[in-house]
Image (spheres, rainbow, N blue to C red):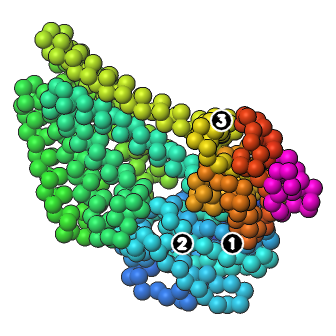
Amino acid sequence: MNAVRYRRTLTALLTALIWLLWAGTSAASGTPAEPLRLLPGEGTHELSPHLRWFHDRDASGTPEAMLDRAAPGEFEPLPGGRATFGFQAGAFWFHAVLRNEDAGETRRLLVQQYPMSDRIDLYLRGADGRLTLQRSGDALPFAERAVKHRQPNFWVDLPAGQPVELLLRVESQSSMQVPLVLYTQGDFTAMARDGQIGIGLYYGILLALFFYNLILWATLRDASYFWYMVHISAFGLVLFCLNGLAFEYLWPNNTWLQDRSVPVSICLAQIGMQQFVRHFLELPSRWRRADFVSLALIAFFVALGIAALALPYRVSTTLASAMVLPSVAWVAIVGVVVLRSGYRPAGIFLSAWAAYLLGTAAYTLVAFGVLPKMFLTEYGVQIGSALEMILLSFALAYRYAALRNENERLVQETNEKLEHKVAERTAALSEALERLAEVNRRDGLTGVFNRHHFREQLESLLCDSRTGHRNLGVLMVDVDHFKRINDSLGHLAGDECLRKVAQTMRDTLEPFGGIVARFGGEEFVAALPGCNETRALEAAEAVRQRIAAHPIPVDGREVRLTVSVGVFSLDAYPIENPEDALRRADEALYSAKEEGRNCVRRAGA
């Protein structure tokens, strides 16, 4: 009797537990997400915790119908809190409610941090019930994006204190990854800058390795170096496409090529990789059967690359991505076997391939929705491939050293070639030093000449004027009340104003042959070769009027500037050295400031 009662009690507890779990799941999926509150000082918001989603399998839903579904909570929370679903047919809808409580930031940029989505439709519904639509994705020309950036993006107007419904429809033959982030303009600029720096470093490594191995291939005519360059180039193109850079810079108006570039470049990268492995590990002589398998993989990727020009994107990309893992795994197997046979360069080769294998596997598994999208999984392929290519360069160097020890004649010829290469690099270094000298003559903020270089130029012009009996005018320009700008708008706004003043002076004085420099702080100086006093005063007035007539846009505001100008002319007051010319121009500037600013005064007036 006790056993029966025990079983009944246990059954009741299990039933209650199952009901509670079901009720909790239903409540989570049946409850609309809380609005995302945008507070002052918070410039970046990941939307995943606030999104609800719905899979429209036949892609037939309308935005009105989806908003009606979202209102009672029929949309579900993101599985595991991540917006990665693998390769899926149909359309995916995402819904969130935003409430802006930052009156100073009523416009933000919504960025879809996965560049390969085909069609992205953003619907916004404000408090007035009006529905607006914006479109993006690589099925549209790149120029139609809100901001010219590799990742699809939309401007979102968010009136302070009012809820705004966000409904996003994504349909793509690529992997369904929809990581959405909302930025203020300042945070987006910082994010884009940091991203460009990282991408620049990565492609800088690839370019350095490419040209380094190009030199070695041209010198040694070793096929390993050639196929290594093919692998670097093709793999770089793969990431250039996947990062959205190819669509931004190479074919921004060719959506057909954008779709085909990914599977074709993947195939090219695998062909280069397998060919490199065959030559580096000397498979035709060391392991003939493995060489046949590598040739079969090469034939497969050649056929797939050609077929990808006609196959649907989802078919070709899925197949190419799926075959990357066995292709790379085969390379690892071959490397282990050849290393065990006593071929020492295969050790470094395997170390390189381990990093590449992990990075590629992580990226591929994210594409299929197996792993979450995070820094290591999203950028693991870049990190792994950079390590792989650097280590493979070491492996090639090790292999080359072994061959050098066996052939002294090859060493001698190689040294001669390397000396030639050093001479070329020395010449390149000399050019770089010349460019550096030019940079040292410039003011870092405004781009015009600095004070030191202007002093040298003025001394030379004075000498030419005395020997050739030519006129020379000198202008000293000061931005009026500049401290108020720094105090009220900040130093960044002040810097922007100085840049604009320098640019205006350079553009205005160009017809006069003027040489413009920043003298210090908010003061600028200019030399006008061949200009008498009348001509110098005319140039000074042109600068003053142009600056006063053109307000400078800074952070959405227009800043009006005026300048005071002092003019000195050699034909009016002969002097002996540059200091005298600058002193007289400065005295004239002081008179202009004393007489109310925003005016031009000549020396001695």
Q: Secondary structure at mark 1?
A: strand
Of 171 and 207, the residue lying toward us: 207
Task: Compare marks 1 and 3 and give the one earlier in the sequence.
Answer: 1
Crowd tier of the residue under label 3, counting other residues whose Cα lies within 10 Å: few below 14, some 14–19, many 20 or above: some
Magenta-highlighted residues: 586-605
Q: Disc 1 designates what residue?
A: 107
Q: Disc 3 designates what residue?
A: 459
Q: Is residue 518 visible?
A: yes
Q: Disc 2 designates what residue?
A: 146
Q: Position of residue 340 (x, y in %)?
A: 21, 20
Q: Position of residue 470 (x, y in %)?
A: 61, 46
Q: Secondary structure at mark 2?
A: loop
Q: Residue at x 87, y 60 (%)?
A: 597
Q: Position of residue 50 (x, y in %)?
A: 64, 67
Q: Residue at x 50, y 65 (%)?
A: 148
Task: Compare marks 3 and 2 and give the one earlier in the sequence.
Answer: 2
Q: Secondary structure at mark 3?
A: helix
603 part of magenta stretch: yes
Crowd tier of the residue under label 1, counting other residues whose Cα lies within 10 Å: few below 14, some 14–19, many 20 or above: some
Q: Quadrant of residue 279?
A: top left
Label 1 and label 3: CA atoms lie apart by 53 Å
Q: Is residue 21 visible?
A: no
Q: Please determine whether, in this image, residue 588 is positioned above or below residue 508.
A: above
Q: Residue at x 74, y 64 (%)?
A: 541
207 part of magenta stretch: no
The quarter of the image holding the N terminus is bottom right
Label 1 and label 2: CA atoms lie apart by 13 Å
